[in-house]
Image (cartoon, grey):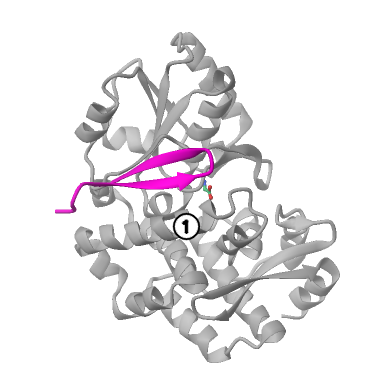
Amino acid sequence: MIKKEMVPFRFSDKEVQCWFGVSFDDIREQLSDKRVIWVTDEHVYQKYPEEFPAGECIILPAGEAGKNQDTVNTAIEELLNMEADRDVFLVGVGGGVVTDMAGYIASIYLRGVKFSFAPTSVLGMVDAAVGGKNGVNVGLYKNQVGVIRQPEHLFYNFSFLNTLPELEWISGFAEIIKHACIRDAEMFQFLLNNSLEDFRQDLNVTGDLIRRNAELKYKVAAGDERESGQRRLLNFGHTLGHAIENITTMPHGFAISIGMVFACRLSEKLIGFDPEKTEALKYLLKKYHLPTETDFDKEKAWDILVHDKKKSGDTIHFILLKGIGEGVVHPLSLSELKTLFFEM
Ligand code: GLY
């Protein structure tokens, strides 16, 4: 049984109450003095219909394809039909797509109402729900529109993981491995000593691992909320990863996994990263059932890559590794990257 505990996550304008080890009842009790409107998606709703009160719930389409302004506009119309005023409190219950959209909807509805998140996936718990970036995709380009605004609470109900499909476990572990690569060599070793099957069987150990990752993400993000420095490290594997995700049907974590291997190879060429460490990462990714390479259209990937938000002018802030647990931000001109990208 995971201990219920509140850990404050302090951002510049807000202390987010991060509750680990809570149940749905705990969440309801915590918010009992508010008019709560729940925001979830079709998949989560189908699994837990009894938890969402009829008439006080917005059900978004499941998946990345619906993460756009049209879905947000529909949700806002629903809020208006529910006569939700400025005191309404939105709670996003779902994976990263749901929490990113719920936070964005709450941030723009009536110029901003309060909100909290209850992430339901590994990826949501260790990454998407933490950090305050909320928004939607525009066409093929990910998260191009949005806000940085923190929730009031993060509610970690680890029992959601009992119904999480295997593919989503695997995808979420890509972000955990990313955290280990950029900041936590000890966790890299811990992951090597365990397996996905071990974590799936023991939610207590998984809960501890998720908490360690949520805290790592919080510390990196809180030190650089607007992403002009160390927060960029969290993009390790994401520059190529996002492009692959957009041009294939691959889940996020799978694409990031391939992006991390590419970033390691680039690290070997540019800053002398030990090739044996690239092999160690590949071994770890495979151990967690993640891909390390795929066939993809390089021209198409490049077109998407150059629209990356991490680009300023002709420079892209690529995240490389000096060692395991030692991510670094490496400014690279687009022309230099292009040459390397097409010869690798
Ligand atoms: N929503 C994820 C982040 O702020 O990084």
Vertical position of residue 82 compared to residue 49: above or below: above
The secondary structure making up most of the magenta span is strand
The residue located at (63%, 70%) in the rendering is 295
Residue 60: x, y in percent?
Answer: 46, 30
Location of mark 1 (residue):
219
Q: 264 left or right of 193?
A: right
Q: 13 left or right of 262?
A: left
Ligand 1 within 8 Å, label 1 CB: no
Residue 182: x, y in percent?
Answer: 52, 71
Residue 225: x, y in percent?
Answer: 58, 49
Vertical position of residue 166 compared to residue 14: above or below: below
Within the magenta stretch, is there residue 3?
yes
Q: Residue 310: tell me if it is visible.
A: yes
Q: 296 left or right of 181?
A: right
Vertical position of residue 170 compared to residue 81: above or below: below
The residue located at (65%, 80%) in the rendering is 267
Say which amino acid is labelled 1: Lys
- Which image quadrant: the C terminus? bottom right
Q: Over which residues does the magenta segment extend?
A: 1-19
Front residue of 81 and 208: 208
The residue located at (55%, 64%) in the rendering is 256
Within the magenta stretch, is there residue 7?
yes
Residue 73: x, y in percent?
Answer: 59, 23
Residue occupying the far left of the picture: 1
Q: Residue 129: tell me if it is visible.
A: no
Q: 230 left or right of 101?
A: right
Front residue of 256 and 100: 100
Q: Secondary structure at mark 1?
A: helix
